[in-house]
Image (cartoon, rainbow, N blue to C red):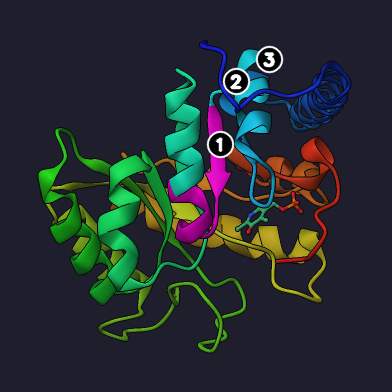
Amino acid sequence: MSDTAATVRPDRRAELANGLARVRGRIADACAAAGRDAAEVTMIAVTKTYPAGDVVALAGLGVVDMGENRDQEAAPKAAEVAAAGVTPRWHFIGQLQRNKCRSVVRYADVVQSVDSVRLAGALAAAAAGRDRPLDVLVQVSIDADPARGGALPDAADRDRGLGAVAAAVAGAETLRLGGLMAVAPLGWEPERAFARLAEVASRFRAEHPAATALSAGMSGDLETAIGYGATHVRVGSALLGMRPTLR
Ligand SMILES: *Cc1c(COP(=O)(O)O)cnc(C)c1O
């Protein structure tokens, strides 16, 4: 790691180390309670709103996977982190506009938020210049509210139906279908949300047996998500602190 602007003060490093120990402890306890091996669950540090120095410090503490939700913020941050000699595995987890695909495929290793056939097509075209396929998770809507993000599990909709989106990703040479991602809907008990997601995931895996990733659970509900089979949890505030604005 070279000495660049992307560094943190020792007290911030200690704060991140404490946050990381707490979150790793929560994940271990949840896995034990669910009878699962903690090695089955990957923690993604969601670094949105936090500076490149925090990413470099987390990488120094052994965190490999980082998540961002806005390209305008993620693209320069990824460049700054790379300039510091650190290459995390970047997960793009936010709503993605088709005109941002070309930028996102330059730094992202995984895009977790593909929820339409049109977006899958734009991403597949943008990923053509990469030296290896882009990993993609299809974001599913747990409450099937078409106004919010997520492919619709039980819909035959040609653009937004889960079956159509998954087929579009699986059929694209430049993309690799890895599994599903979801966010618990506002106002739903995590228990109900992730139980429903587990049903959707089980039917999905019958069709796509290799696509085993299930990205679910955040700072407030990761234990419940692990209980329902999450393989990836996306943790921001419990690790890095409360963000100044909720988004
Ligand atoms: C911000 C964000 C997270 C992390 O949320 P926390 O509650 O801070 O852990 C997880 N997933 C997505 C899609 C996010 O946008």
Q: Which mark is residue 59?
A: 2
- What is the magenta range? 65-75
Is the distance from the Cβ of mark 1 to the nearest ligand 1 atom less than 8 Å?
Answer: no
- Residue where numbered disc 3 is placed: 61
- Residue where numbered disc 1 is placed: 66
Check whether the beta carbons of the residues at disc 2 and disc 3 lie within 8 A of each other: yes
The answer to whether residue 66 is magenta is yes
On screen, 42 above or below 213? above
Q: Earlier in the sequence, mark 1 or mark 2?
A: 2
Q: Earlier in the sequence, mark 1 or mark 3?
A: 3
**Secondary structure found at label 1:** strand
Q: CA distance from mark 1 to mark 3?
A: 13 Å
Q: Is residue 209 shown to the viewer in this render?
A: no
Three-letter amino acid code at disc 2?
A: Ala
Three-letter amino acid code at disc 3?
A: Leu
Q: Give the quadrant of residue 10.
A: top right
Q: Give the quadrant of residue 116.
A: bottom left
- Residue furthest to the top in view is 1
